[in-house]
């Protein structure tokens, strides 16, 4: 394959990559990279590239052999750190290791020395060509090989390979400048078996077979300047579908999935049309390719002119629930083609702009396709997520700045990881980062209007499009890189408005706002006395000063008021436009212009206020806790047409278990015009209220009569009608109501027998023969309802629970679950939803003491080979079993799977995430599971066992933090003289014998852990000898840890005059590791 290269600060380049062959059985790649470099400075004698895992065989510059140095300090972060096991130390060392190879700072794992014969050519700024021969064997990251263990050829088995990774991961499968800010044009060639198809970025210009017709080479050209991280590849026996509506769009899927592909992609052209219309700009590439693969790293991975999706997104026309999820994923991928692939970021600090814009226009697509209600519900969900995360973790900073001073170097001291690089971020933090970015874009839209916002996007795309056509003028390509400054400048030029305060509050600062509101009505003055307080002392909160919108629904209409939150202002007087009525019939006008009749008997006779809302447009990143009477929440639920207001009212009514609240919720359930997700939420609220009112509840169990009236036969109420899911809103309500009903409890805290029998009858009489849609999600929810009906078993005289002595109700539940599980093996449902629900139910039976706790069933379903959703459900059960039973054997089994499982999504992400969410123990509690062996295993995992996957390493760090905290784990024995008290400086420091130090003549292992050792070239203090940067001995083996320790300020060196620069030169020299060509077999 031929790749164009990105450039270091001193070079511009074009890249060409050739993959000479893929071998699926051996999982190997042989490749060749050609880089055309245009120097922008004189004295170019070093070329630094990124490369991980690759075995470099040969490097040439303009046909001359070039010596090279390969060193990856992230392979093993801490070398001599065998005693501390300190996460603070590890995080600092890891940040320094990532910085040491950061391409944006001009660093890289591979350093090539330009032959001296070519220095004059570099001084004349003439082009240089760099040729690199490399191979990959059994890669752990970057490329994922899927080779099913069945008989047949590779094509018959559906074997395929695809690139994957999180942020700047292209270096894992070929040498490059792995930076989003280094653009170049590309020629890509892939040689594969004749039965395979290679899909990559750009236009396919030709396919050439070898003479024996056993292999063929795909030639792709990408003339638009593109960063290396936006290059991707997929090779497999794909079936190909040219989009019938847009011939420049091609879809690829694995064998036998073509019918699902045709249906799933049938509406992609509508997404294209929408984005091109709102952006008034054509799709920037000449083609677009969608590739669906198994064992995908993420659901959606977007790269230049192509996107890689999980094959689990494909579905038939019979599946209801998957359709909106797949459309959302396609919309996200296409939005990122414009902002993220075509327009790239200038630096990591500008990531929020691209994620924000792509998320914002994706939200506009949601609004247009799924409606305003769905859009506002999504915004509320996203706002609740970011608020909950920031209040718990302490803040998400969108635009971090790093400068001089220790405080500036760590703008987020509340986090246990650094935000200096994407590779050091927690995955959960990064998801919240993206969430906050698009919410801030929406705040900017509120400030300058949607029209101006779209004009800004159009301007950015137009400039980038013009720049991309400048083929050999790479200095023009900077218009294709977006920075925070350029984005804000464009907003100022287009709108003429100053959004500086908004950016300072929500972009340059982390945390959210927390409001508490209450009110009183002054009848004499006819004034609403509103009090708004803030909590800005808790973690994750900030003080807000600025405007806030308050909407007051009165008898004579709905009125908006803009209040100014000042430094110390708490109370605000709002004049009312209405006066109280007594026995006067008149329709109440609502905000949307609708006039409705209301029963005003519940309200205060002296007050004209019906309900009050604070910040109804969600124009502040905030949490609001507002106090108003129960009847006001009931009015708001019944008559406010905004779904966000209705959802807020439902949440508030949980605190008011009264007959009027019950009636209001029931009315909402019966309103077909009401948004279906509001009705679904009302089901669960009604169940909670019914449980609180169990002593005074009258009539049939909550929701039973309503469900019977809506979905059951009139002549026989216990028999459900034949399924007909043509009305999607009714379908979702029919799925949800039994699940909520199963949460009802009687005075003995048991699920009422008539409710349980009703659910069993729904299962028994379920008939889907005449339905055009599948009922597998509905049946899965009925199993979920059976699970919710379970309550803890009552043990008599510590009797051993067996299946034989189960009570009648639990026996019925277990029989149904067993029957479903057996039927699923004969007739599998879509995505095995039935099996997933059954596994959850079995675990719940175990936790409640009805059957013995046994992890063997879950371990069998968690094994590689089962469908991914089934494995995740089984793993959730195993993680829960480990926590409840404190089982060291199961914890070890899970950690072994983390290290050995073939699927990246399962082993490299989900298990560690589950253990963080549901940990076997925490740092604040003593546990027998907390021992030295576990500390060593987790430390080894994050220190050297996860160097192939940035995301996995951060997951391991999160788990270590959850279990042990930032400091030395308490289960480790304290080393002798572990702390030394410095009386002069009045502080305790780690014993120098515990923390690693570098000194003259110290022999240090290389980070690659390959058995090569070296010695610093001078036995004296390294800072006492002056070295010239250009005189580094390229034939001497050195160690990268010197660079890291320099960043960590761990070197104890004398403060001799003029010593700092010379010491830095030594450290730079000591951060490189060279393999002679005769040693390349040791890589």
Image: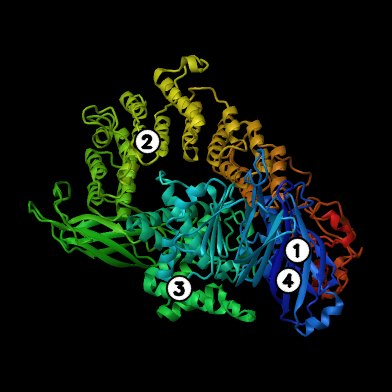
Q: Which of disc 4 and disc 3 is earlier in sequence? A: 4
| Coordinates of residue 740 in the picture (x, y in percent) | 35, 36
Q: Which of disc 3 and disc 2 is earlier in sequence? A: 3
Q: Is residue 713 above or below residue 359?
A: above
| SS for callout 2 | helix
Q: Which of disc 2 and disc 1 is earlier in sequence? A: 1
Q: Residue at x 74, y 42 (%)?
A: 974
Q: CA distance from mark 1 to mark 2?
A: 57 Å
Q: Is residue 28 above or below residue 11?
A: above
Q: CA distance from mark 3 to mark 4?
A: 32 Å
* Residue 94 badge: none
Residues packed near mark 2 inside 10 Å, few (<14), some (14 to 19) or many (20 plus): many
In the image, which is nearer the foreground, mark 1 or mark 4? 1
In the image, which is nearer the foreground, mark 2 or mark 3? 3
- In the rendered image, which residue does mark 4 sit on? 35
| Coordinates of residue 909 in the picture (x, y in percent) | 60, 47
- In the rendered image, which residue does mark 3 sit on? 281
- In the rendered image, which residue does mark 1 sit on? 32
- Tell me the colour scheme of the image: rainbow
Q: Are marks 3 and 4 in contact (CB under 8 Å)?
A: no
| SS for callout 4 | strand
Q: Is residue 223 visible?
A: yes
In the image, which is nearer the foreground, mark 4 or mark 2? 4
The quadrant the C terminus occupies is: bottom right
| SS for callout 3 | loop
Q: Residue at x 40, y 36 (%)?
A: 781
Q: Residue at x 39, y 29 (%)?
A: 789
Q: Are marks 1 and 3 in contact (CB under 8 Å)?
A: no
| SS for callout 1 | strand
- In the rendered image, which residue does mark 2 sit on? 739
Q: Are marks 2 and 3 in contact (CB under 8 Å)?
A: no
């Amino acid at each position: 394959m031929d790749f164009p290269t990105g450039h270091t600060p001193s070079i511009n380049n074009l890249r060409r990559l050739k993959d000479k062959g893929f071998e699926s059985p051996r999982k190997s790649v042989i490749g060749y990279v050609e880089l055309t470099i245009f120097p922008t400075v004189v004295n170019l004698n070093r070329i630094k590239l990124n490369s991980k895992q690759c075995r470099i065989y040969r490097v040439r510059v303009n046909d001359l052999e070039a010596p090279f140095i390969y060193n990856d300090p992230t392979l093993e972060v801490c070398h001599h750190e065998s005693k501390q096991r300190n996460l603070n130390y590890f995080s600092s060392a890891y940040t320094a290791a990532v910085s040491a190879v950061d391409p944006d700072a001009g660093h890289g794992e591979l350093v090539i020395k330009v032959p001296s014969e070519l220095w004059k050519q570099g001084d004349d700024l003439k082009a240089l060509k760099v040729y690199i021969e490399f191979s990959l064997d059994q890669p752990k990251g970057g490329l994922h090989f899927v080779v099913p263990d069945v008989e047949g050829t590779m094509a018959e088995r559906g074997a395929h390979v695809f690139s994957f990774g999180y942020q700047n991961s292209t270096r894992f499968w070929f040498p490059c400048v792995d930076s989003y800010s280094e653009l170049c044009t590309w020629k890509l060639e892939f040689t594969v078996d004749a039965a395979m198809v290679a899909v990559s970025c750009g236009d396919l210009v030709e396919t050439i077979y070898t003479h024996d017709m056993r292999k063929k080479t795909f030639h792709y050209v990408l003339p638009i300047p593109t960063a290396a991280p936006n290059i991707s590849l997929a090779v497999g026996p794909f079936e190909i579908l040219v989009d019938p509506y847009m011939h420049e769009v091609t879809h690829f899927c694995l064998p036998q999935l073509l019918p699902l592909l045709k249906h799933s992609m049938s509406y992609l052209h509508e997404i294209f049309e929408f984005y091109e219309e709102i952006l008034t700009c054509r799709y920037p590439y000449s083609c677009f390719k969608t590739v669906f693969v198994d064992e995908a790293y993420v659901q959606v991975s977007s790269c230049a002119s192509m996107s890689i999706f999980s094959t689990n997104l494909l579905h038939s026309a019979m599946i209801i629930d998957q359709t909106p999820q797949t459309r959302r994923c396609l919309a996200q991928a296409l939005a990122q083609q414009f902002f993220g692939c075509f327009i790239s970021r200038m630096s990591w600090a500008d990531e929020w702009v691209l994620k924000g814009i792509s998320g914002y226009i994706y939200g506009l697509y949601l609004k247009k396709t799924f409606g305003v209600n769905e859009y506002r519900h999504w915004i509320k969900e996203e706002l609740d997520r970011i608020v909950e995360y920031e209040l718990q973790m302490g803040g998400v900073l969108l635009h971090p700045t790093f400068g001089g001073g220790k405080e500036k170097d760590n703008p987020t001291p509340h986090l246990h990881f650094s935000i200096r690089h994407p590779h050091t971020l927690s995955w959960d933090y990064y998801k919240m980062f993206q969430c906050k970015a698009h919410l801030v874009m929406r705040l900017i839209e509120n400030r300058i209007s949607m029209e101006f916002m779209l004009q800004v996007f159009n301007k950015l795309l137009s400039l980038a499009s013009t720049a991309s056509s400048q083929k050999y003028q790479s200095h023009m390509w900077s218009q294709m890189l977006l920075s925070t400054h350029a984005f804000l400048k464009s907003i100022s030029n287009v709108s003429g408005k100053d959004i500086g305060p908004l950016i300072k509050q929500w972009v340059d600062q982390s945390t959210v706002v927390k409001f508490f509101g209450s009110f009183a009505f002054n009848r004499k003055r006819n004034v609403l006395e509103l009090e708004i307080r803030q909590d800005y002392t808790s973690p994750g909160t900030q003080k807000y000063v600025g405007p806030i919108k308050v909407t007051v629904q009165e008898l004579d209409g709905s009125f908006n008021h803009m209040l100014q939150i000042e430094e110390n202002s708490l109370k605000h007087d709002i004049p009312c436009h209405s006066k109280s009525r007594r026995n006067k019939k008149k329709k109440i006008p609502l905000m949307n212009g609708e006039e409705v009749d209301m029963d005003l008997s519940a309200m205060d006779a002296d007050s004209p206020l019906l309900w009050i809302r604070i910040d109804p447009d969600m124009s502040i990143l905030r949490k609001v806790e507002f106090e108003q009477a129960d009847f006001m929440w009931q009015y708001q639920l019944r008559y406010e047409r905004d779904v966000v207001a209705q959802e807020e009212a439902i949440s508030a009514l949980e605190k008011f278990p009264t007959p009027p609240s019950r009636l209001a919720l029931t009315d909402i359930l019966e309103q077909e015009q009401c948004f279906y997700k509001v009705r679904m939420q009302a089901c669960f609220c009604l169940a909670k209220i019914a449980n609180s009112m169990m002593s005074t509840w009258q009539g049939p169990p909550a929701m039973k009569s309503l469900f019977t009236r809506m979905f059951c036969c009139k002549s026989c109420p216990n028999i459900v009608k034949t399924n007909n899911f043509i009305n999607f809103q009714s379908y979702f309500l029919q799925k949800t109501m039994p699940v909520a009903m199963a949460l009802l409890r009687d005075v003995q805290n048991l699920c009422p027998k008539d409710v349980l029998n009703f659910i069993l009858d729904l299962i028994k009489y379920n008939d889907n023969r005449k339905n055009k849609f599948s009922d597998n999600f509905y049946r899965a929810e009925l199993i979920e309802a059976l699970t919710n009906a379970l309550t803890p078993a009552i043990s008599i005289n510590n009797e051993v629970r067996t299946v034989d002595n189960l009570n009648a109700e639990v026996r019925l539940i277990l029989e149904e679950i067993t029957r479903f599980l057996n039927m699923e093996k004969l007739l599998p449902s879509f995505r095995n939803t039935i099996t997933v629900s059954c596994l959850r139910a079995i675990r719940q039976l175990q936790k409640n003491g009805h059957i013995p706790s046994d992890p063997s069933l879950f371990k069998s379903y968690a094994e590689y080979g089962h469908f991914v959703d089934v494995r995740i459900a089984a793993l959730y059960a195993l993680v829960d079993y480990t926590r409840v039973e404190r089982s060291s054997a199961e914890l070890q089994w899970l950690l072994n799977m983390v290290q050995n499982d073939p699927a990246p999504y399962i082993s490299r992400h989900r298990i560690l995430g589950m253990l963080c969410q549901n940990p076997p123990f925490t740092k604040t509690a003593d546990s027998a599971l907390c021992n030295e062996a576990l500390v060593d295993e987790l430390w080894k995992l994050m220190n050297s066992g996860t160097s192939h996957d940035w995301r996995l390493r951060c997951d391991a760090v999160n788990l270590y933090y959850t279990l042990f905290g930032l400091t030395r784990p308490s289960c480790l024995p304290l080393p002798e003289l572990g702390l030394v008290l410095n009386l002069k400086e009045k502080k305790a420091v780690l014993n120098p014998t515990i923390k690693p130090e570098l000194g003259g003549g110290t022999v240090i292992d290389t980070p690659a852990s390959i058995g090569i050792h070296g010695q610093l070239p001078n036995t004296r203090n390294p800072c006492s000898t002056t070295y010239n940067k250009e005189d580094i001995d390229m034939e001497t083996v050195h160690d990268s840890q010197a660079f890291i320790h320099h960043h960590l300020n761990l070197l104890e060196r004398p403060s001799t005059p003029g010593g700092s620069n010379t010491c830095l030169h030594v450290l730079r020299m000591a951060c490189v590791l060279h393999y002679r060509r005769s040693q390349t077999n040791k890589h």
